[in-house]
Every structure is written in C-alpha cells, then in structure tokens.
Amino acid sequence: MRNALLLVVAGVASVGLLTACGGGDDAAESPKPSLTISAEPLNTDGGSQPSEVTAQQVLARLTGKVSAAKPGTVVTAENDKNKLLGRPHQYTTKVTFVDSRIAASDVQGLAKDDLQRGGAVEVFGTVEDAKTRSEYIQTVTKSLPSLAEYHYLDGPVLVRVSHYLTPQQAADYEAAVQG
C-alpha cells in the first residue's frame, strides 16, 4: 500500500514538473509582429495577417521600392557561409542583393553574393533575435570600418546594406523598410 501511495505521489509530482517546464503557450509569450514594408498581406492563403515572412518576400518589396537593388543569392543550409541558417536564435531565411550604384572596382574580387555588393535580408523567428544579430555585427565591425554596414530593423527582419553606398543612397533602403 505504501509503495502504491509513493508511486501516485511521484506521478503527480512528475506531471506538475512537466507542466511547469513546458506547458506555456510560446506564441502568446513572444508574438511575431507583422512586417510593415507593405500594407498588402504577404501570405497567400487569403488571411489578413502574414503567417510567416520570408527574406525573398521582403526583398521583392525592397526591389520594388529601390530601383538599384536586384536579387542576389537565396541562402540555403548548403551555401550559408556563416552556417547560421535555421540554427537556434539565428535567421530562418536569408537572401542577398546587389546594388547597381556600387562601383565594380570597389567589390572586385568579392564573391558574387557578398554583402558588400549590395546587402542582405535576414528574417528571424523573433524581434529579439533580429536585434541581437544586428547588435553583434555592429559590435564586431565597430573597429573595422571596411566591414561596417547599415542596418535597418523591422520586427523580425534585419536589412543589412553595404557601406559602399553613401548615407543618402542607403537611406533609400531605410525608407523602403519603414514604409
């Protein structure tokens, strides 16, 4: 009888611990904000709110607003030089782009998908992850002006723009991201 009672108590305690550790609704604790690059819904299922924004969708909006921007490379797990795609707290989708206002002589010798040829769009699972990535890059490049870049955040989206663009040219991306 005593053993049966101990088994019941242990079972109840186990259920209580499991509920406390993982029973919460993550979506309610950290909702994904909607993207504000366009007033149009980004999903195609007829809903009024985007369910998940991809870097390709964001880039399509950017190239529609910044005529000098052209699509570059869609980053996959196989070609991701940083090996961050899909890793915990890292970008879920990424795409690079080129900007025709950057002189070829400035980027000579760089890979065709190098961020310095134009930029990149990185989309994260949370706003916090996008901010953390932006802050990390800015900290690392602060003492290396040749690697500096412009950053524009919109919710879980980080738009990274080459330092070869003038501040006025980079502002075109900022305006596209903000509205």
Image (cartoon, rainbow, N blue to C red):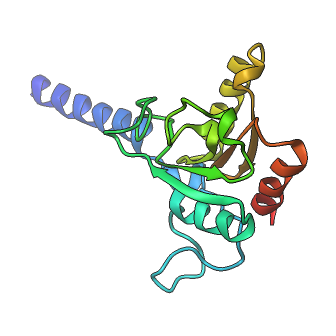
Q: Residue at x 45, y 82 (%)?
A: 45
Residue 159 coordinates in the image, percent (x, y) = 67, 48
Number of numbered labels in the structure image: 0
In this rendering, would 9 be left or right of 83? Answer: left
Residue, x 58% and y 46% (percent of image)? 126
Residue 56, percent from left and from top = 51, 61
- Quadrant of the snapshot with the N terminus: top left
Residue sitting nearer the eye, 174 or 167: 167
Q: Quadrant of residue 49?
A: bottom right
Instruction: Judge from the rendering whether residue 50 lies leftward or rightward of residue 148; answer left or right.
Output: left
Q: Is residue 25 visible?
A: no
Q: Is residue 104 above or below residue 143?
A: below
Locate the C terminus and report the quarter of the image it occupies: bottom right
Residue 130 in view in this figure: yes
Farthest-out residue, front: 105
* Residue 33, position as x, y percentages in the image: 66, 59
Residue nearest the viewer, comparing 162 with 53: 162
**Residue 167 or residue 86, whichever sits in front:** 167
Residue drawn at 63 percent across, 34 percent down: 107
Residue found farthest to the top: 143
Q: Where is residue 12 drawn, in percent x and y?
A: 28, 37
Q: Residue furthest bottom?
A: 46
**Which residue is at the far right?**
168
